[in-house]
Image (tube, rainbow, N blue to C red):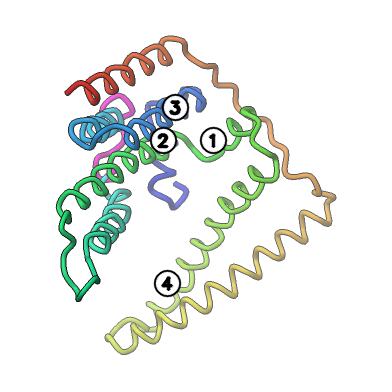
């Protein structure tokens, strides 16, 4: 277990052995459909397709998928609320508030479901290797890889410090919990920054000036999967445009 539920789900997914390029094509196509098709029925069908694929063929746990969607949904809700408020002549609702909110929520939820399908079926290591093969600049891929690795440094520091605070009754009351939370945030920042600096110095001391090279796992592309992807996306576009 890595400590990140989405990453654990990706490693355990039934689509783990599928080519990350195939999954990128599928999810990128779904995102494009979510953006360009009308919310009804296009956006709804895209969101439904992403969820069905994740919980069905990919066998992602429904609880993990639902928990991963909570914060994006909360962000979408806040965005929709601020988009429909009008300040012209006083605070109030925009004349087309319902339509604007519906379009914003529909496009966002559909696109977010497609991105979560990729995140819960493709480990980051496979995704970075696929981006290299697709010609993404090495500097961009390296920054993404370093950021990914530092997430675990941050998570480990957070867990260790919080366990120590709990053992010292640091969360026994609301007042102590508030104080401990502030201390936790400061300690995690300084500790993670220090560990990241030491990691950088250690790699530089070993001559690691061009990035960390690893042997990627060979995951061949599937023509059948790509054909099914093209057929499914074409069906979504047809229904979304003609309905």
Q: Is residue 59 magenta?
A: yes
Tag 2, which secondary structure? Answer: helix
Please give the residue where the numbered disc 3 appears in the rendered image. Answer: 23
Please give the residue where the numbered disc 1 appears in the rendered image. Answer: 127
**What label does residue 118 carry, if any?**
2
Residue contact at pointers 2 and 1, CB within 8 angstroms: yes
| Residue drawn 22% across the image and 32% down it | 48
Tag 3, which secondary structure? Answer: helix
Alpha carbon of mark 4 to alpha carbon of mark 2: how far? 33 Å
Q: Earlier in the sequence, mark 2 or mark 1?
A: 2
Closer to us: 63 or 165: 63
Name the dominant secondary structure of the magenta segment.
Answer: loop
Please give the residue where the numbered disc 4 appears in the rendered image. Answer: 163
Q: Earlier in the sequence, mark 3 or mark 2?
A: 3
Alpha carbon of mark 1 to alpha carbon of mark 4: how far? 33 Å
Closer to us: 99 or 160: 99
Q: Nearer the viewer, mark 4 or mark 2?
A: 2
Question: Which range of residues does the magenta coloring cover?
Answer: 56-65
| Residue drawn 46% across the image and 25% down it | 25
């Amino acid at each position: 277990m890595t400590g990140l539920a989405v990453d654990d789900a990706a490693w355990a997914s039934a689509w783990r052995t599928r080519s990350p390029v195939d999954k990128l094509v599928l999810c990128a196509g779904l995102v494009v459909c979510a953006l360009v098709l009308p919310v009804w029925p296009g956006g709804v069908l895209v969101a439904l397709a992403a969820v069905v694929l994740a919980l069905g063929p990919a066998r992602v746990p429904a609880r993990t998928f639902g928990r991963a969607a909570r914060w994006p949904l909360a962000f979408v809700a806040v965005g929709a609320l601020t988009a429909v408020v009008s300040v012209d002549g006083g605070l109030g609702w925009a004349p087309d508030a319902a339509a604007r909110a519906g379009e914003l929520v529909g496009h966002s939820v559909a696109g977010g479901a497609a991105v979560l399908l990729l995140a819960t079926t493709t480990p980051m290591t496979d995704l970075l290797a696929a981006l290299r093969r697709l010609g993404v600049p090495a500097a961009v891929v390296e920054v993404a890889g370093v950021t990914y690795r530092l997430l675990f440094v941050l998570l480990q520091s957070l867990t260790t410090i919080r366990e120590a605070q709990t053992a010292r009754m640091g969360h026994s009351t609301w007042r102590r919990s508030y104080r401990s939370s502030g201390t936790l945030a400061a300690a995690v920042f300084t500790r993670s920054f220090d560990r990241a600096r030491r990691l950088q110095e250690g790699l530089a001391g070993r001559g690691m000036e061009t990035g960390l090279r690893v042997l990627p796992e060979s995951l061949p592309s599937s023509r059948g999967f790509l054909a099914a992807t093209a057929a499914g996306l074409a069906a979504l576009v047809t229904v979304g445009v003609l309905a």
